Amino acid sequence: MSIDTSKVATSNAGRAATAKKPSPIGAVATWADDRLGLATSQKKMVRKVFPEHWSFMLGEIALWSFVVLLLTGTFLTLWFNPSMGEVQYNGSYDQLRGIHMSEAYASSLTISFDVRGGLLMRQMHHWSAMLFIAAMMVHMMRVFFTGAHRKPREINWVIGCLLLLLGTLEGFTGYSLPDDLLSGTGIRAADGFMKSMPVVGTYMSFFLFGGEFPGELIIPRLYVVHILLIPGILLALVAAHMLLLVYHKHTQWPGPGRTEKNVVGYPLMPVYAAKAGGFFFIVFGVTALMGGLLSINPIWKYGPYDPSKVTAGSQPDWYMGWPDGALRIMPGWESNLGPFTLSWNVFLPIIVLPGLAFTILLLLPFLEQWITGDKREHHLLQRPRNAPTRTALFVALMTFYGLMWAAGGNDIIAINFDLSINQITYFMRAAVFIGPVIAFFITRRWCISLQRADNDRLLHGYETGIIMRSAEGGYTERHLPIDESQAFTLTSRDRDEAYSTNGHADANGVAAPGGRIRAARARLSAKWFGHNVQKPTKEEFEAGHVHAEHEHELQAGLDHPADGHQYDGHHTVEEDSLRGQ
Amino acid sequence: MSSHDEQALEPAGDRTPDTSEPIADPGLPAHQWRPTDVDERLEKRAERQVAALFALSGLCSVLFVVSYFAFEVGEVVTTVGGFGASNLALGLSLGGALLFGGVGAIHWALKLMGDHALVEMRHPVASSAEDREVTLGGFNTGLDESGIARRPLVRNSLLGALGVLALPVPIVLLRDLGPLPGDALKSTIWTRGMRVVRDVTGTPIRASDMQFGDLINAEPAAIFEVDEEGEPLIEGAELQTAKSKGAVILVRIEPDDIVPGEGREDWGVDGIVCYSKICTHVGCPISLYERTTHHVLCPCHQSTFDLADSAKVIFGPAARPLPQLPLEVDSEGYLVARSDFDEPVGPSFWERDSR
Amino acid sequence: MRFLNRSVNGWAGRVSRHRRGPVAGLMVLVTGLLLMGGLYTAFSPAQAQSEQTSDELVAQGRELFIVNCAFCHGQNGEGVRTIDGNQLGPSLVGVGAAAVHFQVGTGRMPAAQPGQQLPSKRPVFSEEEILQMAAYVASLGAGPAIPDESDYSLEGMSEEERQAAIARGGQIFLTNCTACHNFTGAGGAMPRGGYAPQILGVEPQYVYEAMLSGPQSMPTFSNGNLTPDEKRDVIAYLQSIEDNPKYGGFGMGGMGPVAEGMYAWIVGIGVLVGFAVWIAAHGARSTKQKVDA
């Protein structure tokens, strides 16, 4: 069945539209359109087609969590007092009555204990912050594994990485605002990080804190960053991210009827409005349930921040866990440059490493493009197995991230699993180097074998589970060809083409300048595509068909009533007589 | 099987599109109706389900409002099953209201809204050649008319002015963010003769108060001093800063187990030694003391110091031992400091060693 | 029987005679006796320990000690060293009755094997036996005595004093204890496989004794370090934390951000991705055809 792709579908309702009487809504719409020209600008949006797959909704979790953050955060600002002025607590929480604390902490206690719904909003705010960043990470993984970061979406990738970074900073500034013991310890550590920076470290520390740690300016300053500066940038970047998504249109999975030139899916009105809107309420609702049932950040138990108090199990929130892990497993290296001190033990894991990691993350689409030489536009997604080296590379990065993350919780792991923190640290020091390498090779091999399995299905069909015994006594399993749409889906991908240096010499055979780099690039490219399994050519496919038909011929005379389709829904079985009657 | 893997990669050439597709596009599959499309009974049932979900959502919203007023917070907290009732009820009802609403909308979309797949054509992402020409042409015409290319004096003076405006001005405005560090980090509030007092209570300590194996979390006496009216002399941010460098731990170790540091033989009193409580890694306070090994562990990043050996680092990411406070006994028998620490307390920094 | 039935009748209102079985009265009697006995047992004050003189206690304690403790701690509690110079059991001279009451009462002693850290387990000895052993060990050398309830109870304090004590106890707790035991007393990791155990939910007497005697690697908080009043305040604070409602919901173990992050990922992201799969699901399909266009 072929479709006429020259016309854009206008309706999927069963009944034709009929003219209606003038309605009040229509009057308002007319008034607005007279001033805003809405009909023209929204012409394409109203029935815009969105492709459907659950993995396309991961970014939505992040988006709706952001909205929940804005709403719950605004509630909190109505009571929070971002001042470090000292006050003696006289509120409802008995265990801290009479204790000296900052206004920020006291107002956080008020929100938790004296404002109805305050504790709920605080907890919802914190849970949705965690979900926001987790969803961004899951979304990022999906995008990378499916190749949605390739041209023309590299800028969106960059915007996404910036959103991830800013989200992390936003979370850090946010949970530091109540000025409790745990987050204050985190700020103390952050001060230590700044001090470790060569030359400018102490200046940065004194400028940020308005003097020596802790001073009385850090909370109000973090407050401004948290409710104004970063949310402003986040909103702008989210808007740009969405705008590009609308302009480029969403990518889609390959399948029958789907090409690089179309989008197959459902319209904004009514389906996606309902689904996306509904999902917003679901994200909001799940966050509310978590806020009501699970206690997060019980600041009243930590008490106000005091530089001489600390709790066991001092960790930052999960999204800062991996640099904390790097900090824990780093050996205590420090060196002197004349009269100056270079604190490698802090500077490398907490300043250099995250900076490097973020830069690599940002550059991934460009690095990939440089290696593969692929400048085509891509709107069809790739299955991760069809880009084995890329998938393996990202799994290696994830392994590195995961091991560092686990190292950040080494004392919690130790106490829950009866292990030694020293042993965990030693293990991690080696594992963060060896683990990613092992993960890379295993993943790449796994992808390649999955590609082989796919090719087998294409060329030899699927295994029916029917075992045939030939006259000579040998056993084979009967294969039947897979469905046409499945076969098309499997072959709806590009052939890999390595970057080569051909064609870069001029008429006289003189190589163009930059030849060494180009040669390195070609070698990298060859390694990148190395052992990938390509889809079969037309000839191979035909050959496979011939082979299959031949096999069927061989089996035809065996008079088996079972043709292998009994249990796969390809046809009904009422008329079949399996007992050979 | 293996012959397929070894198929050579295509030469790059000019990257003509691959026309040898093994399988032609079978096109969109035929639309399959949902049970709710073809069976009126099921359709009505789905409608009722959606309506019920929305009704439940409304009910939960009402419950939310009721819970808000019914359950108390503040001085007297209503509890249910050991939980704070207000938070639990508000969370569950709000969650219910939102979830049922969302699920209702989704159920409506999945069961009742039209679900024919539509096809929309993509447009090329890049602008068309004509558009590029027009836009670029317009831009160039504008540039020409400004004459910036022909007038290097104007251009350079503009760049110069912008450069001077954009960089120094905002940077200079931020100068008063904080004072310069100076020597502030190199000393603490400890001075000669200042008593070592217990944290929280502020009581001074005699050597005989401590048994072998005791750990006392202590502070400089200055932070507990009060004036004639009983108001503390140091409070607020000043107090926090004093604590962030002045907090110490006192431990009493069997003198035989102590390896005195060079020149530090008389810094302890009868096996009582005093070290800075602030970790030299990034500044967390430490008091996880293992009595049997004389090791103290920092909870933040697990730096471990041996207090019987000048607080040398024996594990973890710290690079420097904890500074030691030299102790002596004053005329009334209380422990006092001989002097301030002989090195900066807390995390290392660039200027740490400079004289 | 009839008398009982009539009383039941009079007490419970008119009950139909036909509904009373022949043994109803007997059942009422037995139930009443059981109820009275049970109430008495529940509400009667604990029996005082059978009074033994201190010499008797020490002698009995020594008997128990020789059988159960001497293998590791020596015949006279002097401690036992192995040939390699490792310690099997430390010397108990001077540890005092408090240490014994703590170790044996929480089941840490007798230890399954000497090693890194002794977990608490079900106690093997009765309270009487523990007191006897404690008396014997106390006789080996002067050490901290077993505290009694008046040492750590807030009885007789006004509401204001009580609150002030609890608040002060909280500050002392956060200064001295949370570094090892965590902000909610859930415990924390120590080097080389050791740990500071959970103290929330532990009986006040044991908390007091642990502070006094410094079990295993724990530093001591002798009365010159934390005065008895300060110890009392800490215990009062711990009690108040236990009595507090769970304001925000389930505490997830009180382990802090690590547990919170785990829940955010597993519960939060898990549930939401599950919803996403549902939303984008292809759904049930019918083979019927729709009649109208």
Image (cartoon, coloured by chain):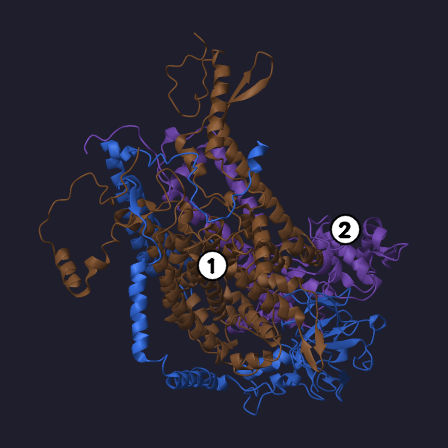
Chain colours: A brown, B blue, C purple
Q: How many marks?
A: 2
Can you name the residue that lies furthest to the right here? C83
Q: Label 1 is placed on what type of residue?
A: Ile
**Residue found 25% across the figure and 35% down from its top:** B37
Residue position marked by numbered label 1 in the rendering: A133
Residue A486 in the image: x percent, y percent? 42, 34
Where the C terminus of chain B falls, by quadrant?
Answer: bottom right
Label 2 sits on what residue type? Answer: Pro
Label 1 packing within 10 angstroms: few (<14), some (14-19), many (20+): many
Q: Position of residue C9 (x, y in %)?
A: 39, 37
What chain is tagged by disc 1? A
- Check residue C110 in the rendering and tell me which mark sits there, or answer none: 2
Residue appearing at x 36%, y 83% in the figure: B151
Q: Is residue C44 something that shows in the picture?
A: no
**Badge 2 and badge 1 both on one subunit:** no
Position of A188 compared to C218: left or right?
left
The picture places residue A181, in percent across and down from the top left corner, at 55, 70
Which quadrant of the view contains residue A291? Answer: bottom left
Q: Is residue A184 visible?
A: yes
Cα–Cα gap, marks 2 and 1: 49 Å
| Circle 1: element type | helix
Q: Nearer the viewer, mark 2 or mark 1?
A: 1
The correct choice, above or below, for C181 with respect to C159 in the image is above
Chain under numbered label 2: C
At horizontal 79% and vertical 56% (from top left) the residue drawn is C57
Crowding at dot 2, Cα within 10 Å, few <14 / some 14-19 / many 20+, comes out as some
Identify the mark at residue B261; answer none if there is no mark.
Answer: none
Q: Is residue C21 left or right of residue A436?
A: left
Q: Residue at x 12, y 44 (%)?
A: A18
Taking depth in this image into account, of A356 and A31 the one nearest to the observer is A356
Which one is nearer the viewer's eye here, B241 or B93?
Answer: B241
